[in-house]
Amino acid sequence: MEKILQVKDLHVSFSTYGGEVKAVRGVTFDLHKGETLAIVGESGCGKSVTSQTIMRLIPEPPGRITGGEIIFKNKDVIKLKEPELRKIRGANISMIFQDPITALNPTITIGEQIMEGIRQHKKITREEAKQKAIEMLMLVGIPNPEIRLKQYPHQFSGGMRQRIVIAMALVCEPDVLIADEPTTALDVTIQAQILELFREIQKKTEVSIILITHDLGVVAQVADRIAVMYAGKIVELGTRREIFYKPKHPYTKGLLQSVPRLDMEKGDLIPIPGTPPDLFSPPVGCAFAARCPYVMEVCDRVYPFKTYISTQHHVDCWLQDDRAKRLVSTY
Amino acid sequence: MNTYFIKRFVAMIITLWLIITGTFFLMHTVPGSPFDEERTTNETIQKNREAYYQLDKPLILQYGNYLAALVQGDLGPSIKKPGQTVNDLLGRGFPISFELGLFTLILAIISGIILGVVAALRHNGWIDYLAMSIAVLGISIPNFVMATVLIQQLAVNIPIFPVATWSSPKHMVLPILALATGPMAIIARLTRTSMLEVLTQDYIKTAKAKGLSPVKIVFKHALRNALLPVVTVLGSLAASILTGTFVIEKIFAIPGMGKYFVDSINSRDYSVIMGTTVFYSALLILMLFLVDLTYGLLDPRIKLHKKEAE
């Protein structure tokens, strides 16, 4: 499969008054053409920082990319200067933010907000841009696009606004779409509609999607592959089937067990005890060791190697080491 | 749309009437009269004077007469400046004050907004600190100090500009500068604060993610949203600047209307007190109305009447 984007050993830090927060500590993944890669993890695990770093949208300073590469179209995004980055943003890689209510400028018509994106990147007339905007609104399922173009964000419902944000992001036909919690601010029925829309659009445009979320329900519906992040690292990455049915990392298992299901008995929900580590001084070994029910001596001291379960599935966990299997035979 | 304007107009008239009534009766409760002088005048002359200006009549009657004349646009004769009407005084003074005020406002708005935007964009950088130091100085230095310093430096030490009076564009420079620093500083601080807030909004991030240039982000997406609080203060600021200032007009010997606000009260020149108050209030009410109209232009969410909002 064609690799459209490669992130290699990415490190991002933020300097604060309390010291340096190592938000992303060595993230590596590839994004293939036309796939949806979900990055899941709890709040503060670095998933949003990772995605915003790909577009170089983190404020620098206080943010700082301390290492790694982001290869897009044979270029390292980290080494690019502002004007070059502006050519990529919106045109090749675009982004959808969490809250559609605040993501649209309240004082500009949605037509203008969609059109300015195309007009920034392509030399086309206003009329052509308008046609394109109408086409996009139809694609995302907004009726009467000609009239709607002249309206302001406050004249739309939350779900409609998210559709507009999606239209805005897709208007230049980007290769990569980063959706940062695109359904979190929406109610459940609208969530389902938006996810359906993602699937349709992907079929039509072959765009690769990076979906940032903490909602495993969303992931189960749309993701092809899933990366599980914990304390600034990807601890497990695999296809949706592998992650949901054969999770290997205790954290992934914990996440799956802590999702409520309709067919569950009361008391079946098992939360993961404890809290994520302090990223001012992250642990030397496995960051999950303190909360892990299977913790071994080695976990605290040395970070586990990446172990491949299959060609598509790898995990950072000592339990997968040959020497550990004897110890935890029940695992 | 029309019903809104009619409603608004009626409200404006009522406001003005309340101000007139309040001022009229308050003014007469202040001890003293226009004819209190050090030397005692002949009782007959005193009575004749009072009769001429209708001051011997019951207060409520004077009030009624005043309102009746006011409706016809007649602000009455000045008591202390014999032979001149209040309409004459304002008619002569206001255009000059207006000219001074208008240039001052234009300068203050443009420089204030630029200073505020630049400071916000270079938040916590040296430009920000410099701009805000200028703003703090502008707010804390009274304009009469500013005026005297400007005269000392730019008219006396280095004689580029004339010291005083109001006759050519060259004469206007110093008073405009002296008058504009205060409002400019206020506008700069407001713009900065409001820009800083707007720049953290998600839609600015969206604009960045679209690949827009910083110039477009600032002027198209941020500034318009940041201007609402600035417009709010501009209404009352404009009314007070356009009607002239006592101090600056005195220092530069500008024959504006600013002096009447103070002089008329000191000398109990009742009709001039009323005249300046009515004029100022009417202008202020008009400005606030314009501010509301501008809101509607800046922010489509603010609708001035119900129908359009539907």
Image (cartoon, rainbow, N blue to C red):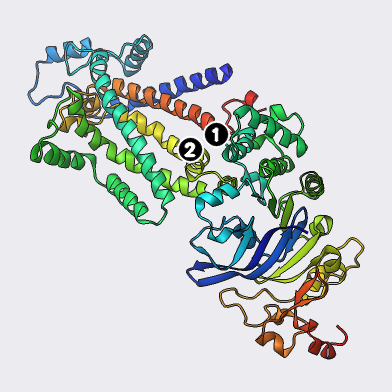
Within 10 Å of disc 2 (Cα), the crowding (few <14, some 14-19, many 20+) is: some
Label 2 to label 1, Cα distance in Å?
8 Å
Cβ–Cβ below 8 Å for labels 2 and 1?
Answer: yes
Identify the residue at the far left of this view: B39
Q: Is A182 placed above or below A69 here?
A: above
Q: Is A45 placed above or below A285 here?
A: above
Q: Where residue B228 is drawn, which disc sits there?
A: 2
Residue B216 appearing in the image: yes
Identify the residue at the far front of this view: A74
Nearest to N terminus: mark 2 or mark 1: 2
Image check: A98 left or right of B241?
Answer: right
Within 10 Å of disc 1 (Cα), the crowding (few <14, some 14-19, many 20+) is: some
Between A287 and A117, the one lying in front of the other is A117
Residue B88: image location, x then y, percent: 24, 13
Write down the quadrant of residue B21 in the picture.
top left
Q: What residue type is labelled 2?
A: Leu
- Tag 2, which secondary structure? helix
The chain letter under disc 2 is: B
The chain letter under disc 1 is: B
Residue A155: image location, x then y, percent: 67, 34
Quadrant that contains the C terminus of chain B: top right
Which residue is denoted by mark 1 in the rendering? Answer: B299
Point 80% across, 43% down: residue: A204
Q: Is B217 placed above or below B89 here?
A: below
- Tag 1, which secondary structure? loop
Residue B301: image location, x then y, percent: 59, 34
